[in-house]
Image (tube, grey):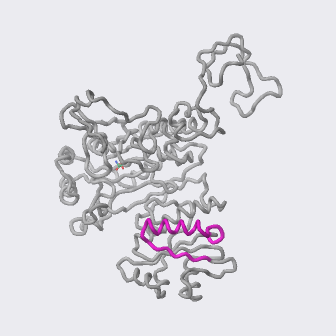
Amino acid sequence: MNAVPLESVLLVKGTVIPRPSGQENSKMATGAVEVQAKDVQILNTCRKLPFEIKDSVKKSESLRMQYRYLDIRSAQLQYNLRLRSRMVMKMREYLCNQHGFVDVETPTLFKRTPGGAKEFLVPTQEPGKFYSLPQSPQQFKQLLMVGGLDRYFQVARCYRDEGSRPDRQPEFTQIDIEMSFVDQLGIQRLVEGLLRYSWPEEKGALPDSFPIMTYAEAMSSYGVDKPDTRFQMKITDVTAEMRVLSIGYVQEALSKSHGCVKAIRVPEGAKYLKGKALDSTLQTIRDQYKQDIMAVTVRSDGSWKSSLGRNLSEELQKVLAGVTRAKAEDLLLLAAGPLDTACNALGKLRLDLASQLEECGVPLRDPSAFHFLWVVDFPLFLPKEETPGQLESAHHPFTAPHPEDMALLYTEPAKVRSQHYDLVLNGNEVGGGSIRIHSSELQRWVLQDLLKEDVNLLSHLLEALESGAPPHGGIALGLDRLIAVIVGAQSIRDVIAFPKSFRGYDLMSNAPDYVSTEDLQSYHIQVTPKE
Ligand code: ASP
């Protein structure tokens, strides 16, 4: 029997007896007993495995993905996948058994939908005709409201062909929800209750309700629409104080519309972040955002050092210290430029420097803390990336305008806020939704006149909205990301049983794969070799 390799499968018949005194192992669930074997059979001998199933054995992620079925035996993946299953079960219970939701499956063979992400195409045997895999069940869930299923929910698989993007998957799972006769607060309260109910006990209790922050406040204080509120280092406005500086580019920045000077104070930044490492972090941000960053350090004796030289008079130091609360050993970073750029650049620095400080042992973010936050009052439209003169939906084209901004819709649409809300957890977007447009006329106008979309693609939805559609709204929670944050995983791949690699490949089976010319023929498809 000594020769049976580890991980083999045995059938042991015998008697369960207590372990001899002193040989118990309190760390094992079965550590108090052992089996006195009468008969042992080998059901399956395990071959030599590509890696040992031990948490202490380091293995590359590609090897783990190639032998995913072995990796799933690891304690970490067992925990992650079991916790995920437990939470989904509780969510079903909460929604279906306690709140009258109906679990409905919607098609995954669908057609192209306007706006949003690029979709995967599925060829058909009819020449030139393709299905699309839906980026979310958005249209179906709205159609279910028209159909009178006034509380819908689904653990929905979604598909987005967005190429290699860090920590994204071409297919992922949403907890998809839609309700009739609901407002923003109604959805928020439902989701808060849902998370409280399904939250793993070992992760501590959640508050009764989550804080709410406007998009404008998130952008100006954190430089992102998904602020990590576990730590301070917020962006402060120092425009008024810095106006006195006679530095050319500061004056130039201030002379332009939305020109400002913003600052973040990095506590103990002067002590831990310096030299080449800091220079290179600042340079990366300068290049990425085309935004200059000025660094000011407060020495341990309280004196200030910066590239601003004599411009930073003692008087100005005092004023700045008053606004930013800078003290000895802190680092101040200042950005003079257009409001959005200055805030975005400092927002990114805030996160990068927080990680660097943590690496130096400064505890900023409690890894066991969970800070949920609602971000609301997003703009309805944003300038299109490729053609900034045109608008695109900030969420999706079915999102309703903010009732207070209705009048602006036809005159200054770029200024209209929407009834879109995001759920943020520790700086990650873990959910997003909106109250929908339920007037066919308004929906047609938004699609056709504002977004220049082909409304024929959505004639079924427009007709449905004319058929007695109730007011409705909903949300989708990104299940993979939510679980990843809860278990503290580095990547969403660590909470998905069979994930794709960064480049969208299944390293175990080698999907996607080539198809023979004969098979392609039935789809009327010819592949031209890459040049
Ligand atoms: N379908 C939306 C999304 O995937 C969520 C929603 O608006 O309910 O982001």
The range drawn in magenta is: 269-297
Seen at 34% across and 35% down, the residue is 105
Count every numbered label the image shows and give the total. 0
Considering the whole magenta stretch, tell me its main secondary structure: helix
Q: Quadrant of the N terminus?
A: top right
Q: Quadrant of the C terminus?
A: top left
29 relative to 486 in the view: left or right: right
The percent coordinates of residue 438 (x first, y second) are 24, 52
| Quadrant housing residue 150 | top left
307 relative to 179 in the view: left or right: right
Seen at 54% across and 83% down, the residue is 308
Q: Is residue 489 above or below residue 449?
A: above
The percent coordinates of residue 55 (x first, y second) are 64, 38
161 relative to 81 in the view: left or right: left
The percent coordinates of residue 24 (x first, y second) are 78, 28
Q: Relative to the observer, which residue lies in front, 388 or 502?
A: 502
Seen at 49% across and 68% down, the residue is 346
Seen at 26% across and 37% down, the residue is 527
Q: Is residue 77 above or below residue 308?
A: above
The percent coordinates of residue 269 (x first, y second) are 61, 69
